[in-house]
Amino acid sequence: MKGKIGIPRGMMYYELYPEWEGYFRSLNFDLITSPRTNKEILDIGIFTCVDEACLPVKIFHGHVDYLKDKVDYIFIPKITSLCKGEYNCPKILGLPDMIKHSIGNLPPVIDTEFQSYKRSSIKRAYNEIGKSLECNSSSISKAYRKALDTKDKYIDRLEAEILSNRKDIESTKLNLLILGHPYVIFDEFLNMGILNKLIDNKVNIVFPEDVEEKDVLYYSNLLPKRMFWTEGRRIVGSAFSLIDKQKIDGIIYLSSFGCGLDSVFTYIISRKAKERNIPIMELTLDEQTGEAGFNTRLEAYLDMMKWRNKNENYLSSLR
Amino acid sequence: MKITFPHLGNVYIAAKAFLEDMGHEVIPPPVCSRKTLEIGTKFSPEMMCMPFKIFIGNYIESIQKGADTIVITGSCGPCRFGFYGDMQKDLLRDLGYDVEVIVLESPKEGLKDFKNNIGKLIGSNSLWSIGKNIKPALNLIKIIDELTQLSNKVRAFALDKKEVNKIMDDYYEEAVRVCGTKEITKLTRATENKLKEVKVDQSHSPIKIGIIGEIYTIIEPFVNLEVERKLGDMGVLVEKSLTPTKWFDHHVYSYPFGSKEENLKFKLAKPYLKTMVGGHGRETIGSAIYYNNMGYDGTIQILPLNCMPEIVAKSILKTVSKDLNFPIMTLVVDEMTGEAGYMTRLEAFVDLINKRREEMLIG
């Protein structure tokens, strides 16, 4: 093993981890991932990060702080753009810089930029990473191929892990779409275990990732304005397609307080949902969200959904 | 067609003059006020940033005065400003206002739409008349920016600060009433002369503070609670890092190379932030270092709550301030901002800088 590379469990980790894993394993590096978010990580994150940032970014700071004494390098790529003509959230663009200026005593940070706005630079970025780690070019190109070959999405693995009992309840009638960024939906500490709570209530959960790429592209292009955020394409496209095909009974949008992208998406999606008469609930999460209030809102929403399906057209004759 | 547009600092004066020269009837929105913000906050999505809310307030106030066409620009950057146009179009339609919204996107996003939108604005005018009219309008933006900067300078030195404020208030009131570029240029020149006649205290050596941050909050006086005037009244010399003139310089005149000043700022920001983060995040950091190099005594960063690029900048400014030993204060504005608390913070900042200066001089 050449050294230990730390990967913080936050932000883009939830989308790109298998790719990174394939790449670094092939280059013979040891990978250390921070544990699932816990209270300690959250507290350190809030302490080190600027107050105005959103909760996932604060948690990310906590994960980096956890890793900094345990590894030789920390991998925080600057993922400006993954597709042509599209960007990521500005906070992801500035993530390595925010970290470097907020947390002291860091090991070397690998902050290579993935800039594919004009033309794809994924290969170049991986080359740069390899070179900064002093690997030879033949092993780099082998590792790059390996990274691209890892087709399985981390989200699928997570889904299987979190929702091991999801299969049993497919017979229920209530299909709910859970929208939001992957780093909000799949961080169980951040969203206070909403997925398991829904499963306990016998809800069939649908994720934006379950929608086919083709549909996502088609429906996100129906917007009058070109969607210039990669994540927005997935969220808005999948919501529109499921609403249009009437495959869902309701939507729960998990957004974090202060998320600029969510403020746009919730408006666009709730407008469409209202048009089609689909109930949508927006749950905003920040470090001060109390679990009791959160549970109450969730229960109230589920009760409404059940009554709606049962009694919608029932008008009592005894008045 | 009665055209209106949202406020962006003093640009409305030049935009009004230009569109009037083109033969349109223009209804500029009333000056932003508490009422504008209240209307905007009532109808906008809760989590949107402050400029969105003020824009909505501007539109509704001008629609009430009779406007039926709204002109705004679009963008496709990572900042959410790109979605303003289409969201606002939907929002106004849902509220039941029958208005046309013209979103001017960059020609890169589709030449056909661009041509259509420009065509709507030109109407029956020839292309030649645009060429003829656009030059004085752009010039006007420059003159007005110079006037504001002059007023800041004079205010810092003036014996009676109220006199300067009076002249500027009169100017803004008059500017809405007169018509066309020629008359406004004349008015601006006259005001300039008036400002030059204000009695000043030449022996005063003012503290110099640069205002940095998100462009809209810097330019629009209502949003930043007239920070220039407030600081000027305390005898502080203020300069803004971004003005409409600088924006045009960077994005239009010197396209695609960028203006000299902005490129210098990018270079200065490089040790701290190498790549762009959208909005004006990189410029903010560059400007802070720029003002330090220019011998300023401090800077104030102003941002609307939840502005994504500026949050990144803020976390980096911490280190800049420490490295350069340079005071930087951050003020966050939103619809809940109270004027008294804001004033207290400004006064405290100026006091601290005064104290620091004394210590530096005496040792």
Image (cartoon, coloured by chain):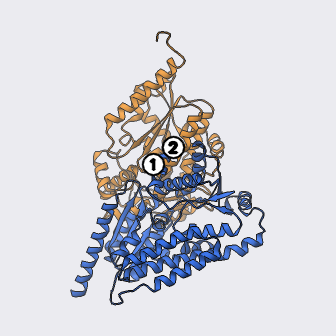
Q: Residue furthest left?
A: B363
> Which of the pair B182/B49 is nearer the observer?
B182
Residue kind at label 1, given as amino acid type: Met
Residue A298: where, in percent of width, then height?
Answer: 40, 31
Q: Are marks 2 and 1 in contact (CB under 8 Å)?
A: yes
Residue kind at label 2, given as amino acid type: Thr
> Chain B's colour?
blue
A188 is higher (above) or lower (below) than B265: above
Residue A266 image label: 2
Tell me the CA gap for discs 2 and 1: 9 Å
Residue that carries the numbered disc 1 in the rendered image: B47
> Which of the pair A201/A23 is nearer the observer?
A201
Query: Hey, which quadrant is residue B352 in on the image?
Result: bottom left
- Label 2 sits on a secondary structure element that is helix
B310 is higher (above) or lower (below) than B290: above
Q: Residue furthest bottom?
A: B203
Residue A177: where, in percent of width, then height?
Answer: 51, 34
Q: Which chain is orange?
A: A
